[in-house]
Amino acid sequence: MVRAVHGAAHVHVLEAGGRALVTMIETSEETRIVLRPAGRTAGEFIDGRSGERLGTLTWSGDPGDTWELQVPSSRALVVLTLRASP
């Protein structure tokens, strides 16, 4: 699902079973993520240090279409969780 992450100092991606967890260290205003979901997908951005929810998202495009996300703000650690949704 995750194809690329641009604008973060370090990135770790874990994917399995229609779910993904992306951790990004030192994000900036230009940090973006390129995805190609297999179907409807939901998720949220979380500040990894405070636990603050930075935003939720949903996608209902065609399977395999490109979905580009802008990280909501510059942070030391941002976590993105994604999951297939009905």
Image (cartoon, rainbow, N blue to C red):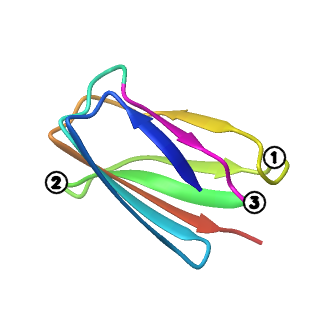
The residue closer to the viewer here, 70 or 49, is 70
Residue 61's label in the rendered image is: 1
Q: Position of residue 49 (x, y in %)?
A: 14, 54
Task: Point out the tag, 2 or 1, that comes first from the N-terminus.
Answer: 2
Q: Amino acid at mark 1?
A: Gly
For marks 1 and 3, give the CA distance.
Answer: 7 Å
Task: Name which residue lies at 62% across and 59% down.
Answer: 42
Task: Name which residue lies at 66% across and 48% down.
Answer: 36
Residue 34's label in the rendered image is: none
* Callout 1 secondary element: loop
Quadrant the N terminus occupies: bottom right
* Callout 3 secondary element: loop
* Residue positioned most to the front: 3
Residue 40's label in the rendered image is: 3
Badge 2, how many Cα within 10 Å: few under 14, some, many 20+?
few
Residue 50's label in the rendered image is: 2
Q: Position of residue 40 (x, y in %)?
A: 75, 60
- Give the residues in magenta: 31-39
Task: Name which residue lies at 16% across and 54% down.
Answer: 50
- Asked if residue 23 is positioned above or below residue 8 in the image, the reply reads below
Decide if residue 57 is on the left or right side of residue 74. Answer: right
Residue 23 in which image quadrant: bottom left
Task: Point out the tag, 3 or 2, that comes first from the N-terminus.
Answer: 3
